[in-house]
Image (tube, helix red, strand yellow):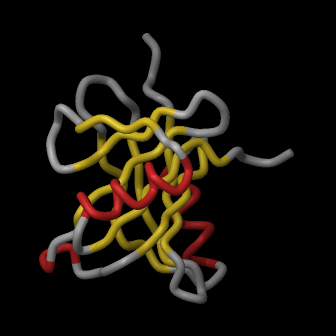
Amino acid sequence: MGNPVTFFEIAGREGEKLNEFYTSVFGWHTEVNPFGGTYMIHADEGIHGHIFSESEEMGFNNHVTIYVEVDNLQSSLDQAENLGGKTLIPPQVIPDNNGSFAIFLDPSGNYIGLYKQPDTN
């Protein structure tokens, strides 16, 4: 198998209502992210994710994004661009040694996240 999907996010204008909707529909357990603004989804099975409110400054609206684990964010972004994708968010470090991420648009305009595990030294 290729690179695994390791995380997902659901975003919309009213994050609190989205959180209520998904916890009711699927019985998900969520908690407010201590870093602010999101609800963390803790899965007993499957992958973890989060639900959040988007803002006008983000430049996008209503979306579901999957995150695929890769060894090299920039290399994966370059490959996506060579195949018709477009980098939306270049590599960013997640605080507290939680790895790093990037986001690109596929040729159809879908948001795809990339995730790299934290370096272990």
**Name of the residue lying farthest toward the front:** 24
Say which of 69 and 50 sits in front. 50
Q: Residue at x 30, y 35 (%)?
A: 31
Q: Is residue 70 above or below residue 67?
A: above
Say which of 111 and 11 sits in front. 11
Place residue 11 in its image quadrant: bottom left
What quarter of the picture does the C terminus occupy? top left
Q: Number of labelled discs?
A: 0
Q: Residue 52 in the image: state x and y as whole percent.
A: 28, 57
Q: Is residue 71 above or below residue 64?
A: above
Q: Residue at x 56, y 50 (%)?
A: 26
Q: Residue at x 62, y 67 (%)?
A: 79
What quarter of the picture does the N terminus occupy? top right
80 vs 15, left or right, is right
**Name of the residue lying farthest toward the right:** 1
Q: Residue at x 25, y 24 (%)?
A: 96
Q: Is residue 49 above or below residue 17?
A: above
**Name of the residue lying farthest toward the bottom:** 108
Q: Residue 74 in the image: state x and y as whole percent.
A: 48, 55
72 vs 103, left or right, is right
Q: Residue 49 in the image: state x and y as whole percent.
A: 46, 45
Q: Is residue 80 above or below residue 74?
A: below
